[in-house]
Image: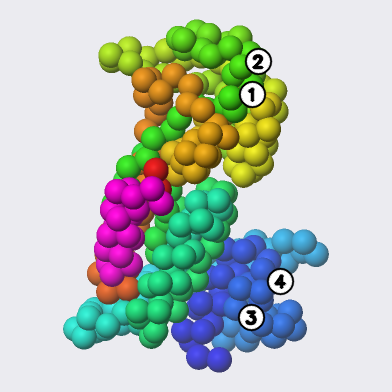
Amino acid sequence: MDIEDSMRFFVSLAQKRSLSGAAQELDLSPSAATKRLAQIEDRMGVKLVNRTTRHISLTPEGEIYLEYAQNILAQTEEMQDVIRNQSGTPTGQLNVHAPLGFGRKYIAPLVSEFVSEHPELVVRLTLSDRHVSPPDDAVDILIRFGDVPDSRLIARKIAPNRRFISASPRYLDKMGRPAVPQDLSNHQAIALRQNDETANLWRLTKDNQTLAVRVPVKLSTNDGHVALQWAIEGHGLLMRAQWDLAKHLRSGELELVLPEYDTPPADIYAVYLQKARLATRVSLFLDYLEASFLTKTTTSDYW
């Protein structure tokens, strides 16, 4: 095991906070992971982690090792990227994280197309609705909706995206069609839970005036596909992004509610660190994303 492998293993161990997690990520057996940690500690001559039956924590020496390992690995990768950029050929591994539903429907097919054009590239696509932030989660490009508050990151807009309120015609025939935002309080919402919070406070804007209306929740879920299906089945109003609603609006399964009002922006961004932009694989994939979504937004594939 060389020093670079040792550092990559230790960084993974510190992020996962478990030997089994690091072993799984690096495709090691549990016994091999235990042996690798012992080898690192023997080489350094100090204990780097405190272990319990469930978790690990870093010792002060472990924290120092982690900081230097992360810096060295980052500099090594940056050096390799600068050298590779001379040829303009993308190589190495590209780590992409995207929301579950959107990633499955749009990002995964684009990754398939992209690697077909660039066979020397390895792509690791993670689909999850949990919050992540580069570089803490080993992500080169993060696909997300809405604003990006972290000043360390650059957000490149790859597609416009609006949220709309919709419901099935059956539900609206029964409950009535809202004419103004205040009418929403007399309806039932299908709410999405994010980070254990249920989003049923809806803000609508028209003519520079914004109203916030809390809609009573009929059903809630943390799965966007489930929420969409409930709306189609007539259980209430749903606020979702246009990419998720498009085909159901075209088919008549869903109908827009108060479409003349704007909701908070949900434009789609590719988020990355400044230094990651140096990598050919990152810059080419960003360009590919933007060009692909430009095509989609002008066809019925997207809206």
Pointers 4 and 1 in contact (C-beta within 8 Å): no
Q: Badge 1 is on which residue?
A: 170
Local SS, label 4: helix
**Label 4 crowd (10 A; few <14 / some 14-19 / many >=20):** some
The mark nearer the N terminus, 1 or 3, is 3
**Residue 112 visible, this angle:** yes
User: Hey, what amino acid is under mark 1?
Assistant: Arg
Pointers 2 and 4 in contact (C-beta within 8 Å): no
Quadrant location of residue 58? bottom right
Task: Report the span colored magenta.
Answer: 283-301
Indicate left or right for 90 with 134 as reference: left
**Label 2 crowd (10 A; few <14 / some 14-19 / many >=20):** few
193 w.r.t. 88: above or below: above
Q: CA distance from mark 4 to mark 1?
A: 50 Å
Local SS, label 2: helix
Tell me, for residue 20, which label it has, or none. 4
Q: Residue at x 49, y 64 (%)?
A: 108
Q: Badge 3 is on which residue?
A: 27
Q: Position of residue 251 (x, y in %)?
A: 52, 39
199 w.r.t. 37: above or below: above
Q: CA distance from mark 1 to mark 2?
A: 6 Å
Residue nearest the viewer, comparing 8 with 131: 131
Q: Residue at x 51, y 12 (%)?
A: 178
In this rendering, which labeled residue sits more in front, label 2 or label 4?
Answer: 2
Q: How many marks?
A: 4
User: Hey, what amino acid is under mark 2?
Assistant: Lys
